[in-house]
Image (tube, rainbow, N blue to C red):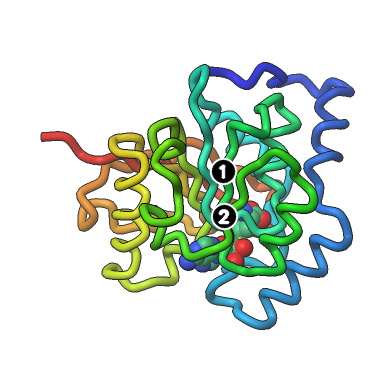
Amino acid sequence: MTPPNASSSLALDDKRREAEARPKGRGVALFFRRWMANPLRMGSVIPSSPALCRRLVRQAWPKDGEMVLELGSGTGVIARALLAAGLAPERLVVVEIEPDMAEMLRETMPGVTVIEGDARELPRLLPQRLQDRIGSVICGIPLVLLPVTEQRRFIDAMQAVAPGRGFLHYSYCATSPLPWKKHDLAAKREEWTPLNFPPASVWRYTPRVG
Ligand SMILES: C[S@@+](CC[C@H](N)C(=O)[O-])C[C@H]1O[C@@H](n2cnc3c(N)ncnc32)[C@H](O)[C@@H]1O
C-alpha cells in the first residue's frame, strides 16, 4: 500500500508536510535533555529527520483497516509524519518509556493511542483488540546497543503482538544493526538517506520461514 499523500516530487505539499513533521523547539530540547540523562536508551542526540520519517512512512504504510505500532516514539516526529501523510489517528499506537515524552505525545497527537511504558512489556500493555489490528511495526529503540539476549526480549514482544508481521528498524550502522541469523530473522535494507544526522538506513526484519 502507498500513503495517499505520498508523492516523489518536490511539490509544495511535500514541503508543507515536512515542515509539519519537523520537531518544534520544545521537542528538540526535550530530546536533548533525555539524551543527556540516558544516552544509551535514547541512542540519538536529536529526533529523526523529515527525510528518514518520509522513508519510514513509505515502508510502514498499512493495508486498509490495519494499524501502525511505533516503539520508542520519542517526541513523535515519525508518528506526526504518518498523520500528515493521511493516517487516521485511530490507526496509530505509539509506545514510549520516558514519561515526559509520553506526555508530549498525548498532548500533541489527539486520537492517537499513547502507551507509556517499556516495549518489552507490550503483550501486557497493548489491549488484545489492538493487537489483532497491527499491520506494521516500527521499532526506534536503539537495539544495536543491547546484548543479544536483551534484543531478543524486544523482538519476542513485537512478534507476540504482531505475529508474522516483522518490523522496521532504523539505524545509523553501515551494516545490519541486528545479528539477524541469531534471531532467526530475514533482513533487508529497504532505505538509506544521507539527509539524516547521522545518515540512516531503514531495515525490514521478518521471521524466517522453513
Ligand atoms: C532513537 S530514539 C527515537 C525517537 C523517535 N522515534 C525519533 O525517530 O526521533 C529512541 C526512543 O526509544 C525510547 N525507548 C528506549 N527504550 C525503550 C523501551 N524499553 N520502551 C519504550 N521506549 C523506549 C527512548 O526513550 C527514545 O525516545
Residue farthest toward the bottom in the current orientation of the protein: 37
Q: Which of the 4 image quadrants contains residue 135?
A: top left
Q: Nearer the viewer, residue 10 or 148?
A: 148
Left of 5 or right of it: where is 138?
left
Q: Nearer the viewer, residue 43 or 128?
A: 128
Secondary structure beneath dot 1 equals strand
Q: Nearer the viewer, residue 156 or 53?
A: 156
Using the rendered image of the protein, determine whether residue 21 is visible from the camera's viewpoint: yes
Q: Quadrant of ligand 1?
A: bottom right
Question: At 31% across and 63% down in the image, what residue appears?
Answer: 153
As drawn, 203 above or below 63: below
Secondary structure beneath dot 2 equals strand
Question: At 55% across and 27% down in the image, what residue appears?
Answer: 61
Q: Give whichever of discs 2 and 1 has the lower sequence position.
A: 1
As drawn, 41 above or below 134: below
Q: Amino acid at mark 1?
A: Val
Q: Position of residue 86 (x, y in %)?
A: 70, 24
Q: Which mark is residue 93?
A: 1
Q: CA distance from mark 2 to mark 1?
A: 7 Å
